[in-house]
Image (cartoon, rainbow, N blue to C red):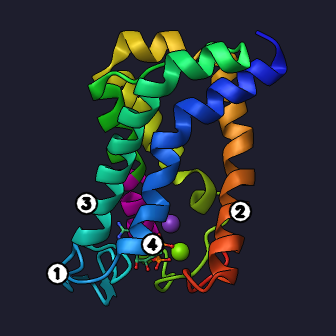
Amino acid sequence: MAVIETIVVAFWAMLPAYVPNNAAVLAGGGRPIDGGRTWGDRRVLGDGKTWRGTAAGIVAGVALAGVLSVLADDVSAAIGIEVPAFEPLAAIGLAAGAMLGDILASFLKRRSGRQRGAMFPGLDQLDFVVVSLPLTALLATDWFREVFTLDVILVVVVLTPVLHVTTNVIAYQLGLKNEPW
Ligand code: CTP
Ligand code: K
Ligand code: MG
């Protein structure tokens, strides 16, 4: 695969994992997942992880995967690069895995003494990749093997932090997010 092809496929295949975080920011609020509970003198997850944000994130990611699947053939023909449709289990793995990764990251942030909103370089940019890819590999193994070849995974690991930083700075400047990370 040419490099540009690999980049396009990686971006396309990761969109259902990228969108949940942004949807959660827009929809977040209400009851926190940890119900306010603490472990030791710190919150388990904190007020930044809510049921509503999580549900909205998963729904947005799965819905986007559905739309992309409908468009996949036309887009492939238009740009001359074969982009994949998403199996339902792949859509769920990518979207739910992204939200789960973000939640696990908050758990690690609280355990390491970081307050809600504090940054954790590296983890902030890749938490959703670290869980969404293995979960998708588990739920939709054949689909995953076909789409996420080693070169695609490599591009995802490099591209994701760049995209994450960019979107978060924009969301911060638009006043949608409290911190630019
Ligand atoms: N959000 C949510 N539910 C989630 C993830 C995010 O409601 N599962 C919303 C919250 O309003 C959160 C905002 O999106 O404050 C920004 O998300 P994020 O940066 O992940 O959370 P932080 O507030 O920074 O909290 P943490 O330090 O735990 O990451
Ligand atoms: K986060
Ligand atoms: Mg944050």
Q: CA distance from mark 1 to mark 2?
A: 29 Å
Percent x, y of residue 104: 38, 59
Residue 67 appears in which quarter of the rendering?
top left
Give the tally of numbered discs. Answer: 4
Which numbered disc, 2 or 3, marks the residue that appears first in the sequence? 3
Q: Position of residue 162 (x, y in %)?
A: 75, 52
Q: Which residue is mark 1?
A: 35
- Which one is in front in this view, the residue at disc 4 or the one at disc 1? 4
Disc 3 versus disc 1: distance between alpha carbons?
A: 16 Å
Query: To which residue does mark 2 refer?
Result: 165
**Residues in magenta?**
99-109
**SS at mark 1 in the image:** loop
Question: How much space separates mark 2 and mark 4, taking CA atoms?
Answer: 15 Å
Quadrant housing the N terminus:
top right
Amino acid carrying label 4: it is: Val
The residue shown at (30%, 61%) is 56
> Which of the marked residues, 1 or 2, is nearer the chain's N terminus?
1
Q: Earlier in the sequence, mark 2 or mark 4?
A: 4
Q: Is residue 111 visible?
A: no
Closer to viewer: mark 3 or mark 1: 3
Q: Are marks 2 and 4 in contact (CB under 8 Å)?
A: no
* Label 4 secondary element: helix
Depicted 37 relative to depicted 18: above or below:
below
How many residues crowd around disc 4 within 10 Å: few (fewer than 14), some, or many (20 or more)? some
Query: Mark 4 near mark 1, Cβ–Cβ under 8 Å?
Result: no
Few, some or many residues within 10 Å of mark 3 (<14, 14–19, 20+) = some
- Give the residue pinned by disc 3: 55
